[in-house]
Image: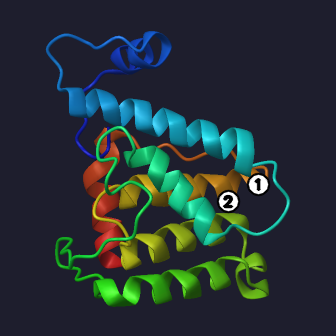
Amino acid sequence: AIEGNTLSLSEMRHIIETRYAVPGKSLEEQNEVIGMHAAMTYVNSTLVSRIGSVTTSDILEIHRRVLGYVDPVEAGRFRTNQVFVGHHIPPHPKDVEKNMREFVLWLNSDEAMSLHPVEFAALAHYKLVYIHPFVDGNGRTSRLLMNLILMQAGYPPVTIRKEQRSEYYHVLELA
């Protein structure tokens, strides 16, 4: 809901459990819910318990599931166009793959692993949204990566409520 989805929790539950559409709500919003559920299931069932490094392929797979029901053409692909996010101008598209390689190296580095898990998760989230490697779904993918790091360290996942939306975006702007 942080990104503007208007579905209630009970409507989301209905969509996930039945795969039936909720009348009067956009299919895009409903497909976002299905995609997030698919991505969360992948993170929880595959990545949390896995031993080893997080790879670029893992991040692309999370994104493929996040966006797969909304924009299957862009799902799991790095962007090829310049995007603008508020006052932030993310790296040029030709630099995205290099930035992502460097990010994944950092993600698996001794430096990153030596950080407190909460700091590590927050910094990983920030670095990924800063690169903004995708046309859409960057925030959702970054929050899933953040929660993956937290859960691997034994912490519960973070939920950012829609009431916290403006504070969340404000803090990202300050970072």
* Residue that extends furthest to the right in the rendered view of this protein: 51
Dot 1: within a 10 Å radius of its alpha carbon, few (fewer than 14), some, or many (20 or more) residues? some
Picture residue at 57% right of the left edge, 59% below the top: 146
Q: Locate the C terminus by quadrant.
A: bottom left
Q: Residue at x 34, y 36 (%)?
A: 32
Q: Nearer the viewer, residue 87 or 165?
A: 87
Helix, strand or loop at label 1? It is helix
Location of residue 80 by image quarter: bottom left
- Gap between marks 1 and 2 measured at Cα: 5 Å
Residue 43 percent across, percent down from the top left = 64, 46
Residue that carries the numbered disc 1 in the rendered image: 152
Q: Nearer the viewer, residue 92 or 123?
A: 92
Q: Is residue 169 left or right of residue 111?
A: left
* Extreme residue in the front direction: 73
Residue 42 position, x and y percent, is: 63, 42
Helix, strand or loop at disc 2?
A: helix
Which residue does the numbered mark 2 point to in the structure image?
Answer: 149
- Residue at 39% x, 70% y is 78
Discs 1, 2 touching: Cβ within 8 Å: yes
How far from the left and from the top, in percent, is residue 35?
A: 43, 37
Q: Disc 2 marks which amino acid?
A: Ile
Q: Amino acid at mark 1?
A: Gln
Task: Give the class, few, some or many, for how many residues have Cα within 10 Å of label 2's Cα (few <14, many ≥20).
Answer: many
User: Left or right: 139 with respect to 122?
Assistant: left
